[in-house]
Image (cartoon, rainbow, N blue to C red):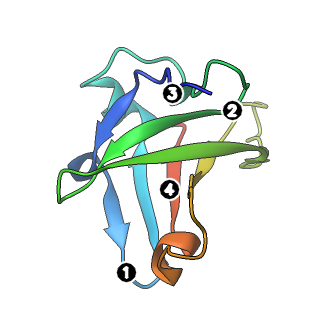
Amino acid sequence: MSLICNLVFLHSQFDYNDDSNIATAEVSDLRRRTAIVCPMVQMWNDACDEGFILIGKNGRQGIWTHCATDYLNNDINDDIAGWRFAPYIRNWNTASDTLKAMRILIIND
């Protein structure tokens, strides 16, 4: 399994809410820095998981993956309203509870 993702976002592109532990961004704002149509790409060469890499405040990379069943409800025009992402955690036992519960929401504006 080799990481082939080439879609990278910076933490500063998202607004983070401490109370809900959710970081949000609008897809149009993300497009300003990256020529993307959809806010996710194939992550690994041998799997269909999609997501992106997030560069945190400390400069460390985090991998965020999209769960296929975690689309937000379609709006009245049958467009996808947004996407919810969860962290890819290699070692669940050593990860913080905050990281385990954190989600990223990208709104399809």
Mark closer to the chain start, 1 or 4: 1
Residue 37 lies left or right of residue 56; in this view the side is right
In-image side of 54 versus 86 (left or right) = left
Badge 1 crowding class, 10 Å Cα cut-off, few under 14, some 14 to 19, many 20 or more, is few
Q: Earlier in the sequence, mark 1 or mark 3?
A: 3
Badge 2: few (under 14), some or many (20 or more) residues near its Cα, within 10 Å? Answer: some
Q: Nearer the viewer, mark 2 or mark 1?
A: 2
Report which residue position mark 1 lands on. Answer: 18
Label pair 1/3, CB-CB below 8 angstroms: no
- Which numbered disc, 3 or 4, marks the residue closer to the eye? 3
User: Residue 2: percent from the left, percent from the top?
Assistant: 55, 24
Find numbered disc 2 in the image and state the secondary structure of the residue it sits on: loop
In the picture, the disc for residue 104 is: 4
Which residue is painted at 43% across and 18% down in the image?
A: 36
Residue 74 image label: none
Q: Amino acid at mark 3?
A: Leu
Q: Are marks 3 and 2 in contact (CB under 8 Å)?
A: no
